[in-house]
Amino acid sequence: MTVPTTDQLVIEQWTGAYDEVDHSPLYDQYGDGHLVALHVLRSRLAAILCGPSQAAVDGDYSEDYKNTIKALETLIGDLENVAEALGLDITLGNRQTLTIGHAVLNQVRVRPNYVNGARLPG
């Protein structure tokens, strides 16, 4: 399906770019540029959360994703509000949503998992 120009612009404005190869199949699945952008942003956040939020090599190199994580969480929240105001289903297909909480313990990030606000067992 061809993605309408207005939806291409929505995807670009929320994610920074529109890529026909990556975003067109998502548009076929979700049918709205806001939902495609939400999928992309959630995927970016998930990718960052799969690794440590910060790492360093003494005196050489360091990286810290804490601000990026906060920025993505804020952007996702803003987009969820817009999508809900437009009457869109932000669960992306009535799937249960997974909310990731995280804390740092001895410089290791610990992430208890929650589904729809309830902590998963284990």
Image: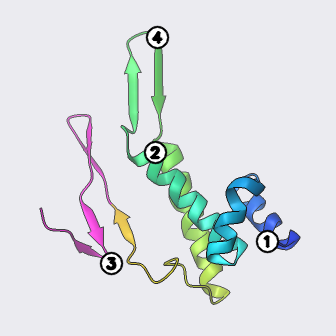
Q: Give the range drawn in magenta.
A: 101-122
Q: Which of marks 2 and 3 is nearer the N terminus?
A: 2
**Mark identifier at residue 60:** 4
* Horizontal side, residue 17 vs residue 106: left or right: right
Nearest the viewer among 115 and 29 is 29
Which amino acid type is marked by label 3? Asn
Q: Which of marks 1 and 4 is nearer the N terminus?
A: 1
How many numbered marks, from 0 up?
Answer: 4
Looking at the image, the residue that sits furthest to the top is 59
Nearest the viewer among 71 and 39 is 39
Q: Is mark 1 on a helix, strand or loop?
A: helix
Of circles 1 and 3, which is in front?
Answer: 1
Which amino acid type is marked by label 1? Asp
Q: Earlier in the sequence, mark 1 or mark 2?
A: 1
Q: Which of marks 1 and 3 is nearer the N terminus?
A: 1
The residue at 28%/68% (across/down) is: 114
The residue at 46%/84% (across/down) is: 94
Which amino acid type is marked by label 4? Asp
Asked whether residue 24 appears in the rendered view, the answer is: yes
Circle 1 residues within 10 Å: few <14, some 14–19, many ≥20: some
**Mark identifier at residue 116:** 3
Looking at the image, the residue that sits furthest to the right is 5
The residue at 20%/68% (across/down) is: 120
* Horizontal side, residue 9 vs residue 68: left or right: right
Which residue is labeled 2 in the image?
48
Whether 118 is among the magenta residues is: yes
User: How far, Cα to Cα, is label 1 from label 4?
Assistant: 43 Å
Circle 4 residues within 10 Å: few <14, some 14–19, many ≥20: few
**Mark identifier at residue 7:** 1
Q: Do the residues labelled 1 and 4 touch (CB within 8 Å)?
A: no
